[in-house]
Image: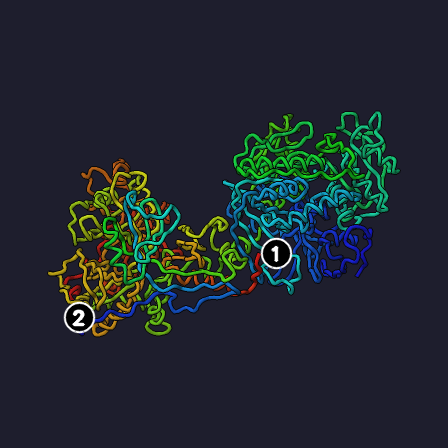
Amino acid sequence: MPESTNRTGHALPPGAKTLRFRFNGKTYTGLQGDTLASALLANGIHFVGRSFKYHRPRGIFSAGSEEPNAIVETGTGGYAAPNVRATEVELYDGLEARSQNCWPSLSFDMLGINSLISRFIPAGFYYKTFMWPRSFWLKYEHYIRQSAGMGECPSQPDAEGYEKHHRHCDVLIAGAGPAGLAAALVAGRSGARVILVDEHPYTGGQLNDRRNSPATDNWLQQVTTELAMLPNVSLMLRTTLSGYYDHNFCTLLEKVSDHLPPAERQDCRQRLWKVRAKQVIIASGAFERPLVFADNDRPGIMLASAVRNYINRYGVLPAQQLCVFTNNDSAYQTALDAQATGAQVKVIDLRLKPDTPDANSLPGLAQAAGIQIHWNSAVSAVHGKTQVKGVTVHQLSDDGRNIQGPGIRLDCQCIAASGGWTPNVSLFSQARGKLRFDEEQQHFMPDRGVAINPNISAGACNGRFDLAGCISEGESAAFLTLDALKISASKQPVTQPPADPEDQPVHLAPRILWAVPCDHPIGEGPKKHFHELQNDSTAADIALAAREGFHSVEHLKRYTTTGMGTDQGKTSNVNALALMAEYRRLPIAAVGTTRFRQPYTPVTFGAIAGKDLQNLFAPKRHTAIQPWHDRHGAVMEDAGGWRRPRYYQQYPGESMHDAVQRECAQVRKTAGMVDASTLGKIDIQGKDAAEFLERIYTNRWHTLAVGQCRYGLMLNEQGMVIDDGVTSRIGEHHFHMTTTTGGAARVYQLLEDYRQTEWPELDVYLTSVTEQWSVISLSGPSAEAIMQPLTSQPVNAADFPDMSWQAMDIAGVPARVFRISFSGEAGYEINVPTRYGQAIWEKIWQQGQAFGCVAYGTESIHLLRAEMGFIIVGQDSDGTNTPLDLGMQWIVASDKADFVGKRGLQRNVFSQSNRKQLVGLMPEDASQILPEGAQVVLPGAIQSNDKGIGHVTSGYFSSTLESGFAMAMVAGGRQRKGDTLEVMLLSGETVRVTVTGTRFLDMQPKAAQQEAS
Amino acid sequence: MNAAEHTLPQACFPLQDKAPLQYQSVTLQPLPHCGKLILRGNFSAFADQPAPRGFITGPDNSRIYWLGPDELLVTSADNSLNVLQQQFAEYIQVDVSDYYQQLLLSDTSGQHSPALRHLLSQLFHLDFDTFAVGQCQQTQCGQAGVLIARQEDGYLIQYRVSYGEYLWEYFEQLMSGVGIKFV
């Protein structure tokens, strides 16, 4: 176990607890407060992973959520988490971490061969290469995905809990750096409800990277303390604003216990907050931009600001010999801090040496500190593969396009590179804000004039990089926000901290060389210039995209995969766009940008699911009769959000087929009962209720007498069948509508929509009463005999004819009984208040036992109705069928003034005889059950590769018919009655069938029907 | 059995036999059944109607909830429903007594307690800072449609009976105390 070798003794609290952790099977130590990345660097480890495509060695590149390289897997078993950034993993005692995307080991990775053949596998190679044989694509894809990938999905169930919460606030502030803190302080002091989030476990942002700033440290502590004391301010650390959606709906991912050892995790692992904010202030800072130079991906090459971060936040000096490679002033701060910590530092600056060096500028201070500066120079080669060992530095030509003169070699183990700064505009972009390109600073920034959702960007994410400016912008953003919220409390400004020794003017405008030259043209030699580290995309790939015409930024993104990694191209996007602009000789602004998408950083599926798992994944709605079903062997199924009995097992092990045949036979023989409570029920009242139905349904409703029931078919405006059901006239202005189980909510909303927006003049009101009534459907030849003892009113066909309803007491309970049937047998639908549902079910059940009455489930419902040719909307129809297609033109009153779908039905195309029409199919082999969805073809069509002419919509075996039978949608089906067709099975076999009508039971000989009854 | 021999069977309501759930100072309890009536029509002449998204006490200790500009819900003791039906005879009525059942979520530490907020914020997307006593709202509780009303003694949740088990199980899990740390 090596001791930490790179600790400076600075930064982390003195006496910070020593922690043990394992990386790739070896044990190391770190300190409390470390990240995995800082602890690895403290142990001298740079090489932590392999790249996505070429499997090149990769190291720790940044110090934050923008990390493209150091992506590892942590934890084991139920605590395993793939694809986490080492820069964001807080170290805890016992942490286990592994490199991913390498096999068999990090140091010897078989797929490292990809790097050797890289010239043959540039961007888009698989689109061009794996074209034949066509059928092999799935096999190719399997291997491509295996070789180019991220971590592995954990094999064990997640051992941790997650939560989802909703929250509201006046102001949501993203980022607790100086701008965010200032904004929160102003807003918080005003009394507004403020949520301030930051992904780090502490406030301050890049203020924490400063080495010698006592005044600023004091300011940070004071502001944080004051915010913590304000009851109306929620300071949420370890929390990322991951998604910014319309209407200022934002999602926050709070890492609650990721930083703790599993044994100490008492709370959930993560919380997903769904925040509805009236105003948002984006203070998300900026990312340092990498330089695109030869082999700029080697372990040991880091962002200059990250090196400074590790030195000053964690007391870790990544290397004793350091080269700072920059095109702007800010990296000099890293050089100065590294040298102050004892490192040997050299600076390679792309810029020309100033004619009159300013002694107080950062380069001036560096020079005064004895740091050697190579002006107008570039790193032309990096030495070392799994760890930087040195660089070759060349002078640049005047135009910067070439190197010149002899190179010099500098020894170093780390290159701290800076290509300038890029405002972090991700959230602004997610909020549908437009970006504009700042030519002077060479970066994209928010175009404030066209923000669509109410937000303000402040500080570095708005292109402001000095401390005083950031605080001032945060303060101003809060003032504007409070104005927008009409909060009139006195606005107290934020006190600026006194200047610190570090507060030197920083010249950020860089010398622009989007790709730094080396000793061979870019893309034409062994060295690679990566602009996108996570997805292994190079400057040469962009040139290729430009040559091949993928000019659009959207095409560029997809062709090269730039910006499509889990880092969303936080450090690569500007370089990619600039390179494309250079190759196309366009201004960068003309190339355009893609939109940043949610989430800002990856969100676990656990957090998205929260507690909506297993039984709580989706509500399972139960009827009042459920306890009886449970006691009587019901095998349940999900149907339209409800749990319904599919069939009842009379004895353990009874198959569904046997149970359904038994249930159906008994219904045809004596009686059966089914729990139909799940049917949608809508109470319709008002003087115009009949007129409303007249417009909703295709048939007539004014003529329906009180006490009568009528079947109705509902169409959409295109004339397609969308629902059906029986509606009964309860009173002159009162109707009771039933809908399909699955269609209840949809139909209710549709009717309300028509009522409120299309026909507001109608005096009609709708009320869902689905759960008000328990519905027991009793049918079969003995149904009347079972019913009669339960009521004092006659229920025979003469006194209670089909398609009528009566109010009556059933076993002492006031009920609405409807004389309707879905099985073709005599039937009653008994509606009682839900509180009595189970009691009445049991009464009927007891009464029915003398007749052998059975309870039956949805499978038998389907079979019984299919024997009669009754359709199920959504099974026999699919939203593209007209009543004519379904053979139900009899229900369309074409001479009515109007109804929904009437105009749609008048289109000529619907009367074409070759449309798919509902027909019956009888297999020649009566034992065959035709599977739903099976394709119907003409005889011999398979041999001649002809297309199918239809498909089976419902297929069953009927004991009554002693044969399999099916309903099917077949092109020109009704003209094919009597024809022989074939049905294709998945096995490849075909079944010969005869086309029939859809009323199967009528096909039985009369004697057989009588016998059955 | 002769039809005349039948007597009204015992009514059965979901969750009615559930013991209250408790976590720290928070209690969830099913309330006894009550009568419920939807009123529809033009309420412009209705003198004592609740404000939008509010509820008031009505005649005979009934409670009148605003559901929409042309829709009110009246609740009362089950046996006084007939009286209410007569009182509101001029409006269209739908008896929904069996459609909704009621749960009361209360906290002896007050309605702003962290424990109560912790539960509410997981189930509702309402802004409970501004949801005052006397207000009601039709909304989602988890994935179930409910009417929630803030009373002096807690939050009354009226749910569709078919969602009863789902909601109870959700509350059971949230109130089991496992992994709860109030925020």
Up/down of A634 relative to A147, above or below? below
Parent chain of label 2: B
Residue A420 got which mark?
A: none
Neighbours of disc 1 within 10 Å: few (<14), some (14-19), many (20+): some
Relative image position of residue A343 (x, y in whole percent):
85, 45
Badge 1 vs badge 2, beta-carbon distance below 8 Å: no
Residue A256 got which mark?
A: 1
Relative image position of residue A194 (x, y in whole percent):
58, 45
Give the Cα distance between marks 1 and 2.
Answer: 64 Å
- Colour mode of the rendering: rainbow
Q: Nearer the viewer, residue A21 or A213?
A: A213
Q: In this image, A918 relative to A565: left or right?
A: left
Q: Quadrant of residue B45?
A: top left
Q: Is residue A321 visible?
A: yes
Parent chain of label 1: A
Residue B3 got which mark?
A: 2
**Secondary element at image label 2:** helix
Q: Nearer the viewer, residue B66 or A532?
A: B66
Up/down of A415 relative to A447, above or below? below
Relative image position of residue A852 (x, y in whole percent):
23, 72
**Secondary element at image label 1:** loop
